[in-house]
Image: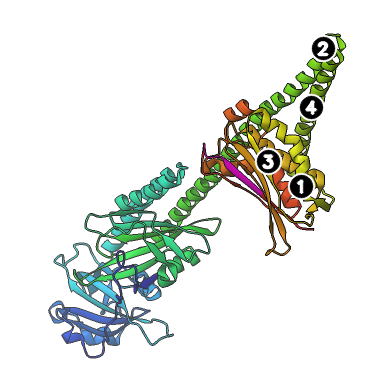
Amino acid sequence: MTIIANTQFLNLIPPNLEFTPLSTDGLFPTLGAELVYTQDSSGRYLHFHWDHSAYLGCDTERIVDFLNENDSFAPVDKVVYLEHLHRILSSSVPERVKCWFKCNIELFELELTITPILPQFGQPITTVLVMGRLLPSKINPHPVNQSVKTLTLIESFLRSQRHQKLLTKISKNIRQILDLDVIWQKTVDSLGKTLKLKHCIICPCEPTSKKVQVIAEYLQPEETSILGSEIDISSEPAFAQALATLKPVVMVIADDHQSQQYKVMAVATYYQSQANSLLVLSFAHECYQLQQAELELAKEVAEQIGTAIAHANLYKVVEKYQQKAEAAERLKSEFLSNISHEIRTPLNGIIGFLQLILAGMTDHPEEQNEFITEAHQLSLHLLNILNNILDAANIETSKIELDFSPVNLKDLFQHIEHLTRPQAEIKNLSFQMEILTISDKILVQGNYQRLLQVMLNLVGNAIKFTHQGGITVSADLIPHKHPATVKVTVTDTGIGVSPDNQDKLFQLFSQVDGSRTRQYGGTGLGLVISQRLIQAMGGEVHFYSLGEGFGSTVTFTIPVY
């Protein structure tokens, strides 16, 4: 399809350009062309003027009054000529052709510019204005009754054959590429060099895109680059039509500076009837009529390129998921390696202490009780590890179920202090528990055992990753929220976490640094499980750290009962 350009896209198409056909009534002697006539769709002459008609024996009155090929002025190959005529009437685009004509016994080679005469709005185009000149090769040496093809037809055929081979080669090469960035640039470079284009751009798009961006371009040195520019599809009707119809749209452009016409073609690349990019080709050579075969070829090449783009997109998605799957597999392997170590360590300790007791290797009852106490502590640690693993499995399958009841915050803090203060004192760390200094007891809505598990995880991590300084655990009432909430904060002066790695803390099987896990121990599940448990109780968990070596702060909220 062909339209007249009136575009805002200045670097490819000059703005506000149009072609306005001339009226023919009474103007033939003053148009400045040696040959001027009008015809209807059947080839009948409506008006006729030729400066050389008398010299060459053409009766202009008989040409207009009669449609008699023996006496009239007519193309040698009328079928081909009428094909040109009908194509121009249907496409509304002027066309320049070279064609052999005959009148009586004379043959002439003419160069013609055939222009559709635009009727009133809404009416079909039925007539053309033809302006031309006699070429030097006036006489055709062959007899009249021999089949003569116009040079335009031969040139078009050869051009089409050449383009078909080259464009097929381009599309074949592009379909072998799976890198999108390479496809973008390879497409515009190949088309630009093969077709000798002034400018060629490509813009990725989605079926619902309202704006597209120029991601790659080919251009001649005198052209201005528009790489990276954004194009509003609604302001470019030709582009919008190409994307909507998936058919090439050709714009005829008149160059005011050089008094020439050239063409710009917009064509959508597509896959399974869905546009995935927009190609815009600006032709550098003189404006010739694009044959229907060439338009079909352009559509076919666009489909091939669209398929290559779709395959590259699919490959990119598959590659991304493959990388994620490989990363997940690697993390799970590391997790299993770490977890096996975490399970074996307390289990070996339990077995060791029990073997000493069974072998009677304790010197007195106090030492035996000490071994039993150590084995008991190790068994509790092992139970905590197994509970974390089970909780992680339940989180994966969304099977965590909690029973809620009022929880006395002061009792919870005292329990935590009793269990964790000795661990901090062993490492010579300061340990502070700060709770609200109000007379009324604070009750929160939650599950006591799960809240205890969360705080043991958070405080235990703070002690584990802190070598000097201390840990502070505090609680603050936030009454302005509805419902009112309590915010619990655990702050340490430990090793901290870099900002880039903080998101990993809340991902199952993801650990900030495998070497840290081997150094400090642990499953890496504590913070993830704590977050999910607090969320299940209607609260939120947040982690803050200025970076490695600057300590960290973990907060969680829980609704007041």
| Residue nearest the viewer, comparing 394 with 319 | 394
Instruction: Using the numbered discs, state the Cα–Cα distance from disc 1 to disc 2 in whole angstroms.
Output: 43 Å
Give amino acid for label 1: Ser
Instruction: State the mark number for residue 530.
Output: none
Q: Nearer the viewer, mark 1 or mark 2?
A: 2
Instruction: Using the numbered discs, state the Cα–Cα distance from disc 3 to disc 4 in whole angstroms.
Output: 19 Å
> SS at mark 1?
loop
Q: Is residue 494 above or below residue 290?
A: above
Which tag, 3 or 1, sits closer to the chain's start? 1
Q: Which residue is mark 3?
A: 458
> SS at mark 4?
helix
Give amino acid for label 2: Leu
How many neighbours does mark 4 have within 10 angstroms: few (below 14), some (14-19), or many (20 or more)? some
Q: Is residue 553 magenta?
A: yes
The answer to whether marks 3 and 1 mark residues whose Cβ atoms lie closer than 8 Å is no
Give amino acid for label 3: Leu
Q: Is residue 330 above or below residue 439?
A: above
Q: Residue at 44% across / 85% down in the picture? A: 122
Q: Determine the image quadrant of residue 54.
A: bottom left
